[in-house]
């Protein structure tokens, strides 16, 4: 009888240890989405980069996008990446494993170009 009790105790201990180790192996990742607004001055689909100019930043800001990045208008309709050149946009991005990843580019207004060809950055709302 004592041998059965020992075998039962060892089996329960091993099962409990397996449950504990699998619970410790789970990883939870939290992603914070950040928003940046500006006008698209350049977009390069080959290099997967988008360059934005903004009143809030003296230098243009370059972001990298992926095949999963959504390009949409203010109503949520899909637009091509070329259609947003010189357009005001809001970029939603997050940092993951040290990389900045653009999740969504939302065109917030029409393309704005002066007769001289200069891009006008609309004031932030």
Image (cartoon, rainbow, N blue to C red):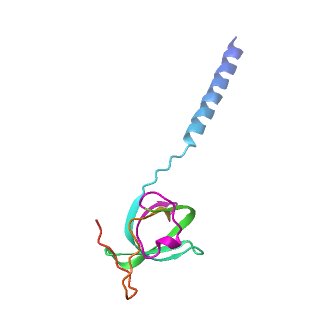
Q: Is residue 37 left or right of residue 101?
A: left
- How far across and down, in percent of the image, does residue 41 sit? 44, 78
- In the picture as drawn, the residue positioned furthest to the bottom comes out as 116
**Between 117 and 26, which is closer to the camera in this rendering?**
117
Magenta residues span 74-100
Residue at 56 percent of width and 64 percent of height: 66
Residue at 66 percent of width and 16 percent of height: 5
Asked whether 85 falls inside the magenta stretch, the response is yes
Q: Is residue 118 left or right of residue 102?
A: left
The image shows residue 29, relative to residue 98, as above or below, that is above
Q: Quadrant of residue 44?
A: bottom right
Asked whether 20 falls inside the magenta stretch, the response is no
- How far across and down, in percent of the image, does residue 22 sit? 60, 38
Residue at 38 percent of width and 85 percent of height: 118
- In the picture as drawn, the residue positioned furthest to the top comes out as 1
- How far across and down, in percent of the image, does residue 25 sit? 58, 43
């Amino acid at each position: 009888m004592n041998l059965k009790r020992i075998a039962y105790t060892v089996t329960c201990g091993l099962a409990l240890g397996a449950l504990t180790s699998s619970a410790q192996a789970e990883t939870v990742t939290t992603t914070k989405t950040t928003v940046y607004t500006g006008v698209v001055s350049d977009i390069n689909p080959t290099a997967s980069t988008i360059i934005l100019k903004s009143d809030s930043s003296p230098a243009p800001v370059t972001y990298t996008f992926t095949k999963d990045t959504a390009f949409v208008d203010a109503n949520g309709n899909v637009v091509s990446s070329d259609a947003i050149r010189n357009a005001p946009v809001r970029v939603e991005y997050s940092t993951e494993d040290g990389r900045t990843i653009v999740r969504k580019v939302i065109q917030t207004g029409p393309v704005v170009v002066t007769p001289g060809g200069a891009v006008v950055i609309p004031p932030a709302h």
